[in-house]
Image: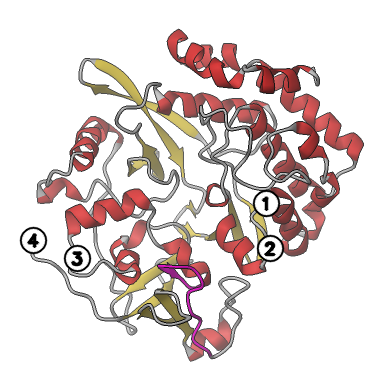
Amino acid sequence: MSAITLPEILFLWWLGQPTAPRLVGTLRWVRRAQQQQAGVSLRYCAEWLATGFALSEDLPLRDVEYMPTEPDAAAGAVDDARPDRWGERVIRLLIKPQRLSTLDYLYFSGDDRFGGLGVSTSEAVYALYQHGALPQFADVQQVHDLVRRVEAGEMLAEPLSHWVAPGATLGGAKPKALLVMDGAQWVLKFSEAGEVCDSGLVEHACMTLALQAGIDVCETRPIAYQHGSATRHAVAVRRFDRAEGVRFHALSAHVALRAAGVDYGYPELALLLRRRGDATHIKANGEQLFRRMVFNIMMDNTDDHEKNHALLVVNNVMTLAPAFDVLPAGQALGYQSMRVGQEGGASTLENALSEHKSFGITLTRAKEVLAEVAAAAHAWPSHFAVTGVSEQDVAVLAQTIDRPFLRSQRMAWL
């Protein structure tokens, strides 16, 4: 396939109702210059200014060109429409665009990207990049084999290359594809080459344990496949930004907190939800986020950075999206990726309690939540075993989850 060269201007569309796409505005490739980051800018069109909504707080409805504020990023909420590291890798290897700019990555993500935005070469019609039909459940083994070939840097046969879709974003650098099951889209995540544990099964076990801890999580399913002579598992994660033919506007916590001009932290995210969320659900939203933060600490999920949390935005009201990408990091770092409390990211329950007021809950209720989560987390070995995680993998995970630093904290609340 010959390399594709794109113009330096493309068009952003709103696909909340995919059968009736609406033009949002113009995207422009911005070169790096003095005091200006390289990336993609956005300018709303007149009709969107009159009848649309601000895509994020740093993109208010004004007739100006919004510039990128971080290196090789897109302006505001547009940044969430671009692919993750795995998606960029797929685009470089399989599509081979002539230019590798942020604008190119945005376009070649195709129609299955995160959220409700789309990128088109036309401002008159939604002219997207077509990847082809998604694989079905019966194709999982073939998808795995294709993913491994992408990891090895091999070329794929044209009829099947679209199965390794670059638009899915749940899971960062993890090899992944999109899958259709039960009439819905699921993100199918595979382990990375060289991983010791069966990470797909571990993630499913941790997500279902989080559900027992009272956390709203994405539905997951373990999907077995053969990796050489061994049986391994991918984890299928049901998308929360799609439902019955409707696409929801969604923001990563990274984009939402950056737009609000605050630090990347759990208390900051809780305060944002109090300000922009449904007024009747302030306490429930705050408690849910607090519960998630505490569970991440107890289960040694230190890869809980701001791109692993998301917000759904409907009628300008923000709601915390279900948790995803929750599993032990296995690094025993002792600090979280997001700020927890007065001691920064320190992975301690005392630190978690230090700013309970930001979550809109009393100290008494915060301690009750700690006890509830501790009870669920303490049963992790038996829950993982029942879910199918091997004894060997449980023993490996115990080295970090049950190390004295975490185990003693958990035991104090039982």
Distance from the alpha carbon under mark 3 to that under mark 4: 10 Å
Please determine whether, in this image, residue 177 is positioned above or below residue 119: above
Magenta segment includes 74: yes
Residue 1 image label? 4
Query: Which quarter of the rendered picture does the C terminus lie within?
Result: top right
Give the structural element (helix, strand or loop) at label 3: loop
Amino acid type assigned to the residue bearing label 2 in the image: Val
Residue 262 image label? 2
Relative to residue 15, is residue 345 drawn left or right? right
Relative to residue 304, is residue 117 drawn left or right? left
Give the structural element (helix, strand or loop) at label 2: loop
Image quadrant assignment for residue 407? top right
- Judging by the rendered image, the residue that carries numbered circle 1 is 265
Q: Nearer the viewer, residue 62 or 224?
A: 62
Q: Nearer the viewer, residue 209 or 239?
A: 209
Amino acid type assigned to the residue bearing label 3 in the image: Pro
Please determine whether, in this image, residue 250 is positioned above or below residue 162: below
Distance from the alpha carbon under mark 1 to that under mark 4: 44 Å
- Whichever of callouts 3 and 4 sits on the residue coming sooner in the sequence is 4
Residue 36 at x, y percent in the picture: 46, 79
Residue 97 image label? 3
Q: Are marks 1 and 4 in contact (CB under 8 Å)?
A: no
Q: Are marks 2 and 4 in contact (CB under 8 Å)?
A: no
Query: What residue is rendered at 21% in x and 15% in y?
Result: 229
Q: Residues within 10 Å of mark 4 (few under 14, many from 20)?
A: few
Give the structural element (helix, strand or loop) at label 4: loop
Amino acid type assigned to the residue bearing label 4 in the image: Met
